[in-house]
Image (cartoon, grey):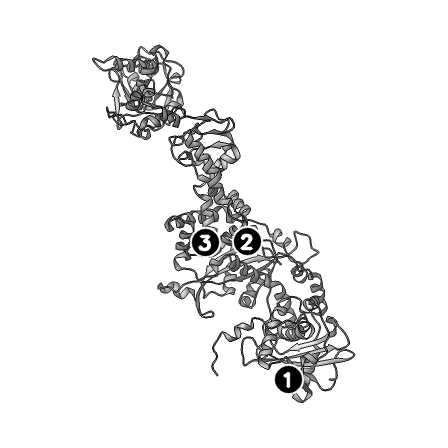
Amino acid sequence: MTSLQCVNCNVRLFRMRRHALFDESADLINTIRLWTYPRDITPTDHICHACWQLASYSSSSENMPTRQVGHHSICVVCGRSILRISHRRILIEGANEEQQRVANVVSSWIQPRQLCSEDEACVPCWLRARRTAVTIPVEDIQPPAPDYVDDDHSALMCVVCGRSLSSTTSDEEWNPENIFRLLELQQTSSMNEVCGVCWAQAQDLSLRVTEGQQERLQQIVLPNIRRAADTARHCVFQECTEAERNLVPEETRREVLIRYQYFIPRGARICSLHREEANYENLYTAEYSLNNFTSAHIEDIIFILTTSLSQYNNYPDNQVDYFIGLSKQQHAQILEATPRLRNMNRGSFALTVLLCKLRTGDSGDRLSCLFQVPRRTLETLMSVARNILLMDFVPQYLGFSHLRREQVAARNSYIADHIFGEPDAPAAQKPAITIADATYIYTQKSSNYLFQKDTYSLHKHRNLLKPFILCASDGYIIDVRGPYSATTNDATIMNDLLNETEFNDFYKENDVFILDRGFRDCMDSLHEKGYIGHMPESKEDGKSQLSTLEANKSRCVTINRWIVEAVNGRFKRDFKIFRHEYFNCGCRHLMTDFKIAAALLNAFTPPFADNIHAEQFVSIIYERLFLSNTIAEIVIEHSLNRRSSWFVPIDATTLTFPRLSMEDLILFACGVYQIRQARSYVGEHFRFHGIYTLEVSRERVHGLEGIDPMLLRAKIKSRHSSAKTYFVFIVAETNMNGRDAIKSYCCNCIVGLRTVGCCSHVMSLIWYLSYARHEGITRPAPFLDEVVLRMN
C-alpha cells in the first residue's frame, strides 16, 4: 500500500485516530485476523478507531464474530471516501478483457489483500489502473508512488480537455486541438493527469500530427537554465502538500529567473508557506526541475527580461524621483524590508502606485489614466500595500518601540545639548531632548455634523485635522499620534500623552521637551512627571514687550524649536497629498498615510546637520544671555520714540555705515531666519517711502557705547498690519567694520529688547546698510505689485 490504511475496512488513516494491532490484546488481534483472512497480520498493520470498537465488542462476546467494517464506501486503492464522488466497481460479472486487466492491476496494488465483489475504486484510481493495464504488462505492475496519489480528488481535472476526473467519463468525441496540448505536456511532471478519453485517443497521436505542427511543438534544452513544471495543480515546490495555492507573482518570477536562473511558467502556483520562506535557490537543484523549453517558454523568458525589467528601470532616475519621491534603489529597499509586499502578485506595482499617490496627491482617476489600470484595481492595490507597509515597514522606523531613549539622547544637536542638556554626562545619563508640535492637514466640509464640528477650526477658519509629531533635535521623527480634532489644543494632546504608559516607560526623569507657547497649560503636568519643559516666554499683563532676559530665553528656545517646523515642512514638500485638501472619503486612512510618510522620511531623509557656526552660536548665547540692553534703557529714559527734534532725516545712500559680511550677519542674528525676512522688510520700506530713509541723531546722546558712536532711528512697517509701525534704534561705531561695530540695538516689537541675536526689524536695517546696498540686491518679486487692482 502507498499510504497508511486500516487493515480491515481499508480507510485511509491520515489525520484519523488509529490503533497499532500488535499493541492490542490477543483476542482483538485474532478477531481482526479472522475478519481479514486469508491476509496475514504484520507488525506494521493498523486499524481505524471504528473497527477497533467493533472488534473489541466482538472479541468480548461469546458468539462467533462475523466480519464487520467501521467504514463503508471506501476506495479500495487510496482509502478515501467515495460516497459523494464518482466511482467504479472493480469485479464485474461477465467482464471483458480490458475490465479484467484493470481488476488484475488493482489486485496487484492492494496485495496482500484480495479483491471481493463489493470493492470499488474512485474514478482517478480507476483511470490510473486502466492506463497501467493498457501500457504495462500485469507482471511488471508496481504499486503507485506516494506522490502519485492526490490529496483531493474533487480538484483533479484532465490537463488536456479540462474535464473533472471525479465525474463519470463518457465517450465524447476527440478534439484535435487537444493533441498539441498533450504533446506539450509529455515533457512535464509525471504528476499530470488525463482522462480516459484523452488517453485512449492519444495512442495513435503520431499519426495525427502534421509535419508543421511537429515543428511548432519542438523543444530546446538549455544547459544553464531550468524550469518548473507548466501546471497549476501543485506548488512549484513539488514536495509541498498544501491544498491552498496562489499564482506566483510576476515580480517573483522575474527575481527568481534573474537571481537563480530558474524559470517559473506563467500560471504556476505557490503555497503561502513557501512564498513567505522564499527559498527559491533550492529549486534549481531539485530533482523535479526541467531543462527542456518550448517556444512559448522562450518567448515568456524574453518578455520577463525585457518588458518586466524595463518597466522598472527604463525610466530615467529623475522621472522616478519626480513621481514617487524615491530612487530606484530606495524603492527596492522597501520591497526587501517587506517580504509580504515583495512576494505579492503585483506587489512592486502596488508600492509604486501608493508612493505616487502620496507624492503627487493626484486623484484616483488621474492615476488610473497615468498607469492605464482601472481605478478600482488601483484602489485595491493601494489598500493592500498601505496595510502591509503599516504592519511591516512602519514599525521598523517609527514608534517608541523601534529605538531606545539613549538613541534619542545621542541625536541631541550641539546647540540643544549645550543650552538645555548635559553634553559632558555619560550616554546613559544624558537627557533625551524632544521637540513636539502638531501640524495641520486640511479636509473638506462634511454633511456629517459631528465630523464637521470636530474638524472646523475657529483659528484657521477651515476644516482640518491635527497629527501630532515628536521628533529629536536633529529632525528624526520618534513617533506621530492622532489625528486629533481641530478643537483640541496642543496642551490637551500633551496631557493625554503624559498619561500613557508607553510614553512614560520610554522617557525618564529630567528629559527635556522643547515646546511652543501653545503648551503653556501642560507645563505643570510636565514638571510633575519629572520632565523639563522649555517654551518661549509670554509677556506679562499690561506690558507690550518681553524683558531683555525673557526675550533672550525665548531666542534660546526658538533657535532649537525650528526643527519641528522644518519636519512639518518636509511632510508638505515631499508628500503633496498632505498639502492639498484631503477628501473626506480618504480620511479613514489619513493617519496611516501620515505614518508611512514619517517612516519614509526616517528611512531615506538625512537628519539635520549641526550649523557650521554652532559652536560660535553657543559662545554668543553664553556671553550675551544676561547682558542688558543699554540703548533700550536710553530710549525709555529720554522717550526717543516721540522726540523728532533729536533726529534729522537722511538718505541711506549717503550714510557711512560699517560693512558686514554674510557670515557676520549670521553670527549677529544667531541664525538665518531674520536675514531672510530682511529683504522683504526693505522692499516694503522702499515702496512706502520711495527711497530708503532713516534718521540720524543731531547730537551725541549721553551714555552711548563706543568711541565715536552714531545713533540711527528708522520706522519699519509691520508685515502683518499696515497700521502698525516699529521704531528701530541702532548704535554703530563709524570707524570700524564687522559685527563688533554694532554696539547696541533695540526695537519696540515684542522681542525687540533681546541681546542674543536680534529681531527681523533690526536686521532689515543692518542688512541693507551694511551689505545689501553694496551688493545691488533689489526687493523681492516686484512684478507682483501690479497684479492686484487697487482702488483709491
In-front residue for pair 326/102: 326
Count how many numbered circles sit on residues in the image. Answer: 3
Mark 2 element type: helix
Q: Helix or strand or loop: what does disc 3 sit on?
A: helix
Seen in the picture, residue 339 relative to 599 is either above or below; the reply is above
- Placement of the N terminus among the 4 image quadrants: top left
Q: How far apart are marks 2 and 1 (CA)?
A: 49 Å
Answer yes or no: do the residues labelled 2 and 3 have beta carbons within 8 Å? no
Residue type indicated by callout 1: Asn
The answer for how far apart the CA atoms under marks 1 and 3 are is: 56 Å
The residue labelled by disc 3 is: 357
Task: Name the residue type under label 3.
Answer: Lys
Which residue is at the far right? 707
Q: Where is residue 74 in the image (x, y as percent from the top left)?
A: 29, 22
Q: Position of residue 506 (x, y in %)?
A: 57, 53
Task: Give the residue type that dot 2 points to.
Answer: Leu
Q: Where is residue 422 in the image (x, y as percent from the top left)?
A: 68, 58
Q: Which of 38 and 710 is in front in this view?
A: 710
Mark on residue 601? 2
- The mark that comes first in sequence, 1 or 3, is 3
Residue to which mark 1 is pinned: 641
Name the secondary structure under disc 1: loop
In the image, 157 versus 311, the foreground residue is 311
Mark toward the viewer: 1 or 3? 3
115 vs 616, left or right, is left
